[in-house]
Image (cartoon, rainbow, N blue to C red):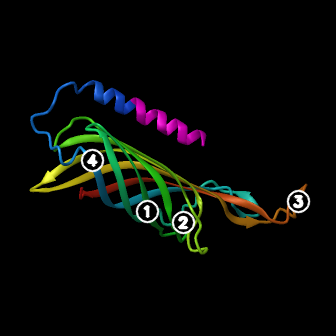
Amino acid sequence: MKRKLIFLFIFIAAVSGLAAQSQFISQDRDPKKNSDLYFIPEINYGYGFLATNYPLYNLQEKAVYDSYSPMSYSVAMNIGYYFTPNYSAGVGVAYERYMQPNANSLPLYIDLRGYLKDAKNTPFAFVKLGDSFSWWRAFEAGEWMHIGVGYKFFMGKQCFTASLGYELKHVGHWKTYSTIDQINAIPNRWAGLNRNAITFNIGWVIL
């Protein structure tokens, strides 16, 4: 929860600073794309940095699983509302596929976006705060956050977004292991796993 509040504070500070630099109405504004409802499907690619406290050899903790694949892929659906041409908020759901250790994730989140200008083409910042939920044991539960910057642009009459971000996924109950060979032994102890990643995201602004 503390990390989510820190991310939210960074996002608000960054967007407020960008908005303060834009005190004019752009001649290139697009009222249909910076007002009312928005619906943005996205595809995402992630390069991860895995870290765990799961003991690999003789109960010695190893910080990083170097032999695992760091790749992840996901699709997301975001729907929300422009409260002003520069600020929007909504909700989203994503399906994420992690390659190794193999896992699926189903994050539900709040989607906050801030745009530098009320224009067809403009930089923006975003933060997504939520959790991944376990469903039919097919999805890996855990804390989930995503923050980044991007650019909204037009190609013909179609509007798209491209962004770079940093995603944090923490799984508190990943694997169990035994400490029976240690003092104050615990038969089954949970090891956690962090699936943090740098992401590249492409979105299609439909509304």
* Mark 2 element type: loop
* Mark 4 element type: strand
Residue shown at 14% from the left, 39% from the top: 29
User: Would you name the residue on which mark 2 appears?
Assistant: 67
Q: Which mark is residue 36?
A: 4
* Mark 3 element type: loop
- The amino acid beneath tag 3 is Ala
> In the figure, residue 199 lies in which quadrant?
bottom left
What span is in magenta? 1-13
Q: Which mark is residue 94?
A: 1
For the residue pair 36 and 30, the one nearer the viewer reads as 36
Queried whether the magenta region covers residue 5, the answer comes back as: yes
- The amino acid beneath tag 2 is Ser
How packed mark 4 is, by other alpha carbons closer than 10 Å (few <14, some 14-19, many 20 or more), is some
User: Would you name the residue on which mark 3 appears?
Assistant: 185
Main SS, magenta residues: helix
Residue 111 percent coordinates (x, y)? 41, 49
> In the figure, residue 56 lies in which quadrant?
bottom right
The CA span between labels 2 and 3 is 29 Å
Queried whether the magenta region covers residue 4, the answer comes back as: yes
Residue 108 percent coordinates (x, y)? 49, 58
